[in-house]
Image (spheres, rainbow, N blue to C red):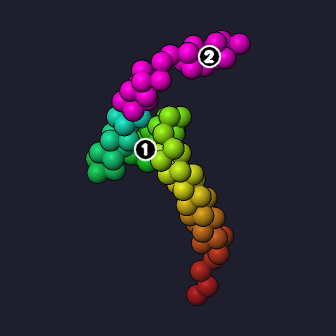
Amino acid sequence: MKKERIWESWRRLPHPIRWVAVATVGGTLVITGIVFMVLPGPGIPLIILGLAILATEFAWAERTLKEVKVRSTAMAAKAKGKIGRKKKS
């Protein structure tokens, strides 16, 4: 119940305010994630979280997030295949 009320209140905000808030929070998370790719920290999860937030208002972020999901699924399947095979001597 509470979650729906929060979402409803968020959607009632004027579009420019939502746009700026989403761009600020999502952009900050993506930039922080990129910085953490070089420094120790959770870089990839922050980038994905930032893209998920940006995807609520921006079509380009939604397309990018879908591409990231497809590629990560493919990489996970490839990694499982390599782990499952044993090296023969």
What secondary structure is found at the residue carrying circle 1?
helix
Give amino acid for label 1.
Answer: Ile
Label whose residue precedes the other's in the sequence (2 or 1)? 2
Q: Which residue is mark 1?
A: 47
69 lies left or right of 17: right
The correct choice, above or below, for 44 with respect to 7 in the image is below
Q: Answer few, some or many: residues within 10 Å of disc 1's Cα (few below 14, many 20 plus, some between 14 and 19).
A: many
In the rendered image of this protein, does residue 6 appear above or below residue 77? above
Viewer-proximal residue, 33 or 9?
9
In this view of the protein, which residue sits in the foreground, 55 or 43?
55
Q: Label 2 amino acid?
A: Glu
Magenta stretch secondary structure, dominant: helix
Image location (x, y in percent) of residue 14: 48, 18
Q: Kindly identify which residue carries mark 2.
A: 8
SS category of the residue bearing label 2: helix
Residue 45: percent from left, percent from top: 47, 43
Count of labels shown? 2
Q: Which residue is pictured at 59% across the width and 58% down the height?
A: 70
Residue found at x 61% / y 85%: 88
Q: Position of residue 56 (x, y in %)?
A: 53, 34
Can residue 29 be seen?
yes
Q: Residue at left 54%, top 56%? A: 67
Mark 2 residue crowding within 10 angstroms, few (<14) / some (14–19) / many (20+): few
Judged from this view, the residue extending furthest toward the bottom is 89
Within the magenta stretch, is there residue 8?
Answer: yes
Q: Would you place residue 25 above or below residue 30 in this image?
A: above
Q: What x and y, as percent, mark residue 60? A: 47, 47
Camera-side residue: 55 or 73?
A: 55
Verify CB contact (< 8 Å) between mark 2 and mark 1: no
User: Mark 2 and mark 1: span between their CA atoms?
Assistant: 26 Å
Q: Residue at x 50, y 16 (%)?
A: 13
What range of the chain is rendered magenta?
1-25
